[in-house]
């Protein structure tokens, strides 16, 4: 009984430690005070400021567009790479699988500096192309990590059986393999969006000077301390938190319904 109480208390303490700063931002997004910790009464002024601020809305659009583009391309590349690794011989697949995971264990600052040096050598430094490629480099290994376990759970003979029954390689791929690993592809896609939205280091080293994402804008606003739109960022943080919670709840509810349907 004591162990159970201690384990529950420890989990609660960890959750409070993780979510307390976010909840603090959410609470103080409903007051017009410019300083967190000073409550001046309930107000929606920060949300009005947020939606009236054309600069922040433009940056939000840039961030979402970049995340979606990088996630789609990284998902296609990572899925193709995972399938190639899975169906290759062990002598080839093992080294490639190991090399593909280097960006995962490597420090992000090293990846960012390497990309910056590479793009400066080929005269593509700080362009939209370098920014998109940088985010793809960041996201693709995580797609491979998400898809490979699903491929290993799949019976490798089903693809060959489809070929024996007269299906073309592309038809067998899209009708047999892709449906069985789709959950892994979706997980990799969602993870790529999260990584791209959250990234600062790679973005700072590869973005054009006239382009900003939420992460670079927030960093510059906090560092300078003179940006009048800084309090409105509390409202933006609260909205992002609510959207992510809603997305997680919807995904979990759909998954539980599917399990219940299979159980019946």
Image (spheres, rainbow, N blue to C red):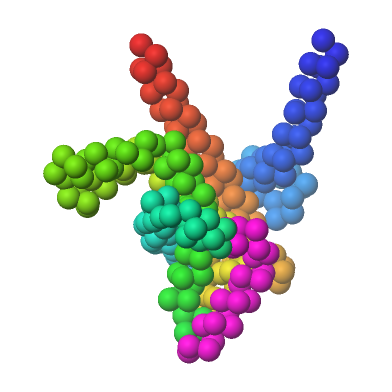
- Quadrant of residue 89 within the rendered picture: bottom left
Residue at 52% x, 42% y is 244
Q: Mostly what secondary structure, the magenta segment?
A: helix
Q: Is residue 255 left or right of residue 1?
A: left
Residue positioned most to the right: 2
Q: Is residue 184 above or below residue 261?
A: below
Q: Nearer the viewer, residue 208 or 226?
A: 208
**Position of the C terminus by quadrant:** top left
Is residue 115 on the magenta stretch? yes
Is residue 168 on the magenta stretch? no
Q: Nearer the viewer, residue 10 or 182?
A: 182
Residue at 83% x, 17% y is 3
Question: Residue 251 at what x, y percent from top left?
Answer: 45, 33
Residue at 47% x, 84% y is 124
Q: How many marks?
A: 0
Q: Is residue 60 left or right of residue 178?
A: right
Q: Is residue 12 above or below residue 37?
A: above
Question: Residue 6 at what x, y percent from top left?
Answer: 83, 21
**Position of the N terminus by quadrant:** top right
Q: Report the span colored magenta.
A: 100-123
Q: Is residue 2 left or right of residue 226?
A: right
- Kindly tell me whether residue 101 is visible in this rendering: yes
Question: Residue 117 at what x, y percent from top left?
Answer: 59, 83
Q: Nearer the viewer, residue 93 or 186?
A: 93
Question: Residue 181 at what x, y percent from top left?
Answer: 38, 41
Residue at 53% x, 89% y is 121
- Kindly tell me whether residue 49 is visible in this rendering: no
Q: Is residue 217 above or below residue 194?
A: below
């Amino acid at each position: 009984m004591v162990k159970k109480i201690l384990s529950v208390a420890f989990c609660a303490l960890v959750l409070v430690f993780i979510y307390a700063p976010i909840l603090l931002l959410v609470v103080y997004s409903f007051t017009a005070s410019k300083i967190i910790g000073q409550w001046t009464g309930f107000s929606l002024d920060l949300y009005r400021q947020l939606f009236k601020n054309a600069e922040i809305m433009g940056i939000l659009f840039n961030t979402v567009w970049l995340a979606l583009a990088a996630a789609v391309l990284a998902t296609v590349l990572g899925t193709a790479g995972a399938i190639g690794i899975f169906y290759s011989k062990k002598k080839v697949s093992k080294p490639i699988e190991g090399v593909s995971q280097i960006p995962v264990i490597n420090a992000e600052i090293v990846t960012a500096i390497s990309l910056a040096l590479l793009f400066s050598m080929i005269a593509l430094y700080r362009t939209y192309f370098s920014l998109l490629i940088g985010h793809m480099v960041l996201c693709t290994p995580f797609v491979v990590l998400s898809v490979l376990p699903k491929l290993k759970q799949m019976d490798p003979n089903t693809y060959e059986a489809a070929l024996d029954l007269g299906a073309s390689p592309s038809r067998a791929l899209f009708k047999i393999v892709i449906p069985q690993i789709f959950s892994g592809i979706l997980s990799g896609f969602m993870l790529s969006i999260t990584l791209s939205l959250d990234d600062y280091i790679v973005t700072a080293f590869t973005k054009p000077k006239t382009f900003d994402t939420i992460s670079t804008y927030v960093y510059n606003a906090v560092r300078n301390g003179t940006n009048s739109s800084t309090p409105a960022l509390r409202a933006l943080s609260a909205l992002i938190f609510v959207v992510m919670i809603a997305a997680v709840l919807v995904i979990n509810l759909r998954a539980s319904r599917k399990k219940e349907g299979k159980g019946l």
